[in-house]
Image (cartoon, rainbow, N blue to C red):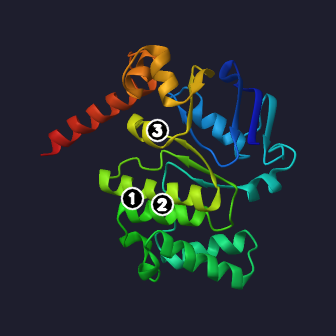
Amino acid sequence: MDIIEVKNLTKKFGDLMAVDSVSFNVAKGEIFAFLGPNGAGKSTTIKMLTTLLKPSSGKILLDGFNPSTNPDQVRHSFGIVFQDPSLDDELTAFENMEFHGVLYGLAKKVRRERIEQLLSFVELWDRRKHLVKNFSGGMKRRLEIARGLLHQPKVLFLDEPTLGLDPQTRNHMWAYLQDLNKKEGTTIFFTTHYMEEADRNAQRIAIIDYGKIIVSGTSQELKSQTNTTSLEEAFLALTGKVIREEEVGAIDRLRQRRRLWSGRR
């Protein structure tokens, strides 16, 4: 049974075709990786799935609901961990969780039980009274995942969930997510630029480029199709090795910062 159904999904911004007639399904309880170069259409697709953008055309069903016409039902069906931090650093871990639970209308007894369960799950219960601004990057990521699960969503969206984390923290985080997937049957939809992360954890992968899904299948199927031995090699064979304009701009900005820094020394 599919919990996400996408058919001929299209999003245009003026003359720019950001997502071009994309179709894919995600099965209930699946760990699904959505991969692509920067600017390929990943974030735009996720924003449409999570009610942040309305499609120009096409069809989306998430847990049987259309995000455009039934946004409230869809929002109760998913949790999301954004690429950029979204915690309130001036609140404690417990207060961040409590505020989220109140927004979702969880009864106090249920809310408090879930907060203790989830903070224990991500090994932060002992730090519940500590201000988030004093947390490490890994601790903040674990808290964001716990918060995203507070209202017991059927789907958890993770946009670059381990970006900038050390390998130890990344491995621990995926152990939590795998355990969650097995115990609660939560569907996990994630993006990443760490190909080994998708190779190790995703049951199925879709690659989007220039707004179109160019291939989908298991990691092994993608490797076989491209006659490669690693998912990274398969990804490069399918999307090319040329650095995209968005990446070039980021590199230029980094070089400019370095020149400015050098000039101040």
The label shown at residue 176 is 2
Toward the right, the furthest residue is 69
Residue type (three-letter) at the residue carrying disc 2: Tyr
Residue 240 sits in quarter: top left
Q: Secondary structure at mark 3?
A: helix
For label 1, count other residues whose C-alpha is less than 10 Å away and answer few (under 14), some (14-19) or many (20+).
some
107 or 84: nearer the viewer: 107
Q: Quadrant of residue 257?
A: top left
Residue flagged by tag 3: what amino acid is it?
A: Ala
In the picture, the disc for residue 198 is 3
| Residue 130 in sight here | no
The reply to whether callout 2 and callout 1 are in contact (CB within 8 Å) is yes
Of the two numbered discs 2 and 3 on the same chain, state the one appearing first in sequence: 2
Instruction: Give the labeled residue for mark 1.
Output: 172
Ranked by sequence position, the earlier of labels 3 and 1 is 1
Q: Marks 3 and 2: in contact by CB < 8 Å? A: no
Up-down relation of residue 25 to residue 154 (above or below): above
Please name whichever residue, 196 or 40, is drawn nearer the observer in this view of the structure. 196
Q: Is there a contact, CB below 8 Å, between mark 3 and mark 1?
A: no
Compute the Cα span from label 3 to label 1: 15 Å
Image coordinates for residue 38, horizontal then vertical, percent: 48, 29
Examine the rendered structure and indicate whether residue 153 appears above or below residue 237: below
Task: Please indicate whether residue 16 sits to the left or right of residue 238 in the image.
Answer: right
- In the picture, residue 116 is in which quadrant? bottom right
Residue ranking furthest to the left: 265
Q: Amino acid at mark 1?
A: His
